[in-house]
Amino acid sequence: MKQQHIGDITVDKHVELEAPFIDPDHALPTSTLDEFETHRRWLDPSYVDYAQMKLIFSFHSYVVKTPHHNILVDTCVGNHKPRPLEHWNMLDTAYLENLRKNHIAPEEIDYVMCTHLHGDHVGWNTKLEDGRWVPTFPNAKYLFSEGDWDHYKDLKVGEHGYVSWNDSVLPIVEAGLSELVKSDYQLDDQVHLLPSPGHTPGHYCVHLQDQGQQAILTGDLIHHPVQVARPDWSSAFCNDPDQSRKTRIKFVDDYADTDVTILTAHFAGPTAGKIRGNGDAAIWDDGSGRAL
Ligand SMILES: [Zn+2]
């Protein structure tokens, strides 16, 4: 992704991994292959590997630099962490080294914003040091939503999601670096959170604005570009698929044919884009020209 400029705010994508990741009906249980054919002209090749019929997913963070704060949004999967999914299990990537080399030193991050508390959005909150999980960004405040905290705080050993909760969320709380916030929290005039419940109860998007320009970092409000055309398709990973559908339909409707830059958590390729058209005719415009 090219660096995005929202007034004096810059946004860079920092990728942990990108791959043909999952079967369409596994990720989007109500999807049909016919519909993927219908939208092939703008999904192929960046977003769907049609030869293998796999959806391509990217796992990345956003490095947001405003005149006042350095912010990291979503922290991917992390290294050395046992995870049930093959693509995520015991990763050993150069995420941290590349972050320092290409964007910013971990010590310079002022805020870590996790749009929600799933394992692929909290992983680099911590790193392994002398056998312990310690905060990767020692000078940051980590903003967790109250809604997600309340939903997950009683997870027990062995329950789904416990492992990432235990190695990537609780150590931050124990270190005193977490701050529980409402999903509409306002950091300052340029950065505020937007409630977007459904994928998780307390899910938030991050809204950036400066000098009349706007961008929204959507987290998992939307997982794949095809959902711009079919916002009624919720993912298999949504806590409340019905609420997720409602939130996404409204989002696509609200931002269609506006100049708001949309930055999602899992779109591959160019990643930054805009929503064009409405209803059945809505498409994802990533600036490549293929969508138009
Ligand atoms: Zn995710």
Image (cartoon, helix red, strand yellow):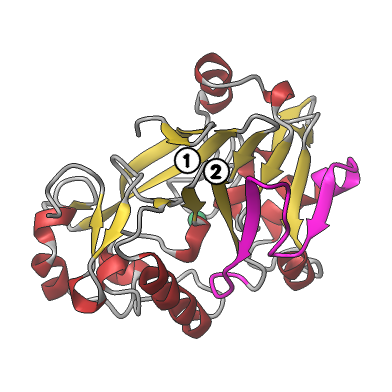
Q: Residue 182: horizontal and vertical position, in percent?
A: 76, 64
Q: Which residue is mark 1?
A: 60
Q: Is residue 198 shown left or right of residue 256?
A: right
User: Residue at coordinates 80% horizontally, 29% vertically from top-left?
Assistant: 138
User: Does the magenta portion include 175?
Assistant: yes
Above or below 156: residue 218: above
User: Does the magenta portion include 111?
Assistant: no
Which portion, as a residue range, is magenta? 171-200
Between 50 and 186, the one nearer to me in the picture: 186
Q: Which amino acid, by three-letter code, is at mark 1? A: His
Q: What secondary structure is found at the residue carrying circle 2? A: loop
Above or below 165: residue 90: above
User: Residue at coordinates 36% horizontally, 40% vertically from top-left?
Assistant: 18
Q: Is residue 75 shown left or right of residue 232?
A: right
Q: Measure the alpha-carbon separation of dots 1 and 2.
A: 6 Å
Q: Are marks 1 and 2 in contact (CB under 8 Å)?
A: yes
* Residue 24 shows up from this direction: yes
* Residue 81 shows up from this direction: no
* Badge 2: residue crowd in 10 Å (few <14, some 14–19, many ≥20): many
Q: Which amino acid, by three-letter code, is at mark 2? A: Cys
Where is residue 129, by image quadrant? top right
Quarter of the rendering occupied by the N terminus: top left
Which residue ends up furthest to the bottom in the rendered image? Answer: 242
User: Residue at coordinates 50% horizontally, 36% vertically from top-left?
Assistant: 7
Q: Which residue is mark 2?
A: 76
Between 80 and 281, the one nearer to me in the picture: 281
Q: Is residue 115 shown left or right of residue 214?
A: right
Between 24 and 74, the one nearer to me in the picture: 74
Above or below 33: residue 75: above
Which residue ends up furthest to the front in the rendered image? Answer: 211
Q: Residue 162: horizontal and vertical position, in percent?
A: 70, 60
Q: Is residue 99 shown left or right of residue 27?
A: right
